[in-house]
Every structure is written in C-alpha cells, then in structure tokens.
Image (tube, rainbow, N blue to C red):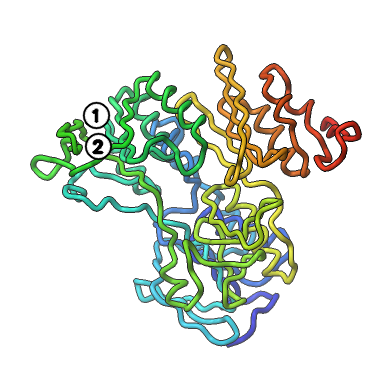
Amino acid sequence: MAGYHDGDGPDGGLLIIGASQAGVQLAGSLRALGHRAPITLLGDENHRPYQRPALSKDFLQGKVTSESLIFRTAEYWDEHRIRLVKGERITAIDRADDGGGVARSESGARFAFDRLALTVGARARRLDIDGADLAGVLYLRNADDALALKARMPEATDVVVIGGGFIGLEAAASADTMGRRATVLEAGPRLIGRAVGSETSDHFLGAHRGRGVDVILNAEIVRVVGADGAVTGVELADGRVVPAQIVLVGIGVIPNTDLAEAMGLECDNGIRVDEYALASDGVTIAVGDCANMPNPVRGAPPGDRIRIESVNNAIEHAKVAAYSLVGRREEYAGIPWFWSNQGDLKLQIAGLSTGYDRTVVRRDDEKGKFSVLYYRGEQIIAADCVNHPLDFMAVKNALAKGATIPADAASDVATALKSITIADPAAPLAARPAVPAER
C-alpha cells in the first residue's frame, strides 16, 4: 500500500468516515492549510452534510427548511476537490501496516485510502422497556428522525419526552410552542443533571413549568402503552398513565466505536486519542463526539480525559486533527462552550464545571437573566448563562486568557463581569492588572 502523499490522484488519499460537523470541518481545514492530497468524505445518510442543532428547534417548528441546514453547496465540494459520498455504511476496514487500506460498505462498494479519519459521531441510546417498539416512539439524532417527528406532530395533542437533557427539553419546548401538551419524564432528581449544577437545574425546572411544560422528576417508567400498534401513553410505577401520541426518547447517546474496536483501536467511552487527535495506532485520526481525548481545559488534572458532545468541540478538534495530518503538532485551542435554545430560554455554557467548590448566582428576574459562575478556589472555571450573553462572553474570554473574576464582586448583579476581570489571578491583590477592554 502506498504511503500517504501530498498530491493529486483518483484513489487513496484521506478517507473521512462520517459526514458530520467534525468531518466537514476536517475536510475544509485541510484544504485551507493547502493540503492537496485526495479527500473523500463519506456518510451513511442519504443527505448532504447538514447542521444538527436546529433539528429539535427551528426545523421541527417549521421556521427553517431542510435546505437551509445544508453545510455546503455542491459547488464547494467540487471547487475544493473533496469527493462527497452519501448513503454508504462502512462495515469493515482492511488495513496495511503503513495505515493505508480499504473500507468496505454494506452495499459492497470499496474505498481505498492512504490515511483514515473517523468522524462517526454517536447514536441515540435506545429505550429498553415493553412497548418501546410501538409506532410513535421516536428518537431525534439525525435528519430522518427529525422528518419522522415533524410528520407525526400535526396529528398529536400530547407529546411525552423521556429524558430531561438538552435534546429532551429543546423538543418539549418546541412541542409546547406548537400548541401541544408536553410532558417531560426525567428519571433523575433534576434536569440537565450531567451538564449543569443544581442552581441552573432548578432555574430550568421552574422556567419550563411556568411556561406550561409538565415536568416529572424521579420518574419510574414501567412501560409504553398503546393500541392497534401505536403509542397511547407512558405508564409510571405509581400507576399513572401519561397520555401520548408521540413519545420522544432522549436518554443520551452512545459513541460509535464499532469500526474502531474492529480495527483494534483502544476505546473507552469513545475512541481514545492523544492531544493531536491520533488514535492508539498512531496513524488513524478520530474527531468529535466519537473521540475520548485529554481534557483540553487549562489546569485540568494530569491524565484527565473527556468526551465532549458539542458543535464547538467538533470544529476545534477537527482543526487539531487537520494540523496532525499535515505534519504539524498543534494542541486544542480555545475554551469548550455549549448552547441550548429551549423556547425563549437561551442557555450558554462556558468552560467545564467539573470539580467546582463554590458558585455565585447572578439573577435578574426583571430582565429575565440568570447566570451561575463556578469556582475552584479563587479561579473561575465555568459559567451557565441564561439569556445573558454578556456574562457568557466575559467568562469565556476570561477563561481563554487564564484570567479570573472575583467571586465577591461578581455577586453584585449590577456589576459587568468584564469590568472586574483580573488578568493575573496569582498576583498580589493590589498588583493585579485588569484585563483591558477589547476594542
């Protein structure tokens, strides 16, 4: 098998399996870096690469069309000499010692490569109870899922969402906006429990209930009930049956590691990669939701690893991988950040709050703004900001610069966080310079 080369040719080159945000970014970043070798971007869906975040929100509500979610025009792929392949599911990969090989698809097609990148994302975790296979029990991970949900919505009056995470709450808020009775069943004691602290969870619980969404915490689901093969409700352990013509399951995702495991790559809650997006064989690239990588946050404990599910991470991690493929070693830049639009509630998260020992809550009910700042010692490490973009940007910028925001001063909701940001947290208090305002 020929080695990976920087030149044109009809075969070989880089094969990117997964036409995801990460896959699209990787291909585009390589071309932006002047990389000239052939690139094939292969997806298993029969759609051009598209943006996923809007599926549970604007697309479901009919505010945007499917065409508006497409990442790139057909001309873009042609102009950048990126071969786009749709509707091919790779089932086996035969590799040579130098990292090259052939990928074989379910249809029997073969795709030769000199180098391989896995941007295969994650799949929805399935509900494993009686009635889970009834018509009307749906998931929301890809475009076909969104089309199926959207098609059923006009005939539904009651929508039950199983799972109180981001996707579940976004979909419940959309259903409520569309005039449906929406109920969220969350097995845990609070909403968005994996991503935010208790103060933010409580804020969202009150906000959703106040807007008309019924939220049941610590919900013990016995089975999904139905008639004539279609769902009619969800039965709880206390005997209640919550009516439903649609049951949307949002109980998390599972990283797609099947191909990687078959290749002998190390996997543990994702495909294990180093700080340059290289898998355990030192050749294969893995990027985005499917990758378990060293924690990129400044000050993270040595050896700490994380798998991040976000658009921002897919983009930044793909840039790291692109540098690796052109022979440069560039580590992850920027601060992980996330967002979730739930009706008129816009949540923006800067940083990772794991390991915090103190919080500061900034609430302005009159303006509908709410923020929680997370600290480890005197250092700010993250923030959850609801309808408060200025707080979000101030914290995000502080984290990027290694700065901090004094907790006591931040507790005054009238104080702009940007104005009290301290550039050098280690300096004596009297000598600490403020971060200059950005022009």
**Residue shown at the point (78%, 43%) measured from the top left:** 401
Above or below for 415 versus 428 = above
Disc 2 marks which residue?
Answer: 246
Disc 1 marks which residue?
Answer: 158
Residue 110 showing in the rendered view: no
What element does badge 2 sit on? strand
Q: Residue 429 at x, y = what percent? A: 86, 33
Quadrant where the N terminus is found in the figure:
bottom right
Type of amino acid under label 1: Asp
Mark seen at residue 167: none
Residue 407 lies in quadrant? top right
Quadrant where the C terminus is found in the figure:
top right
Q: Which mark is first along the chain, 2 or 1?
A: 1
Q: Is residue 339 left or right of residue 236?
A: right
Contact between marks 1 and 2 (CB within 8 A): the answer is yes
Residue 245 showing in the rendered view: yes
Q: Is residue 330 left or right of residue 237?
A: right
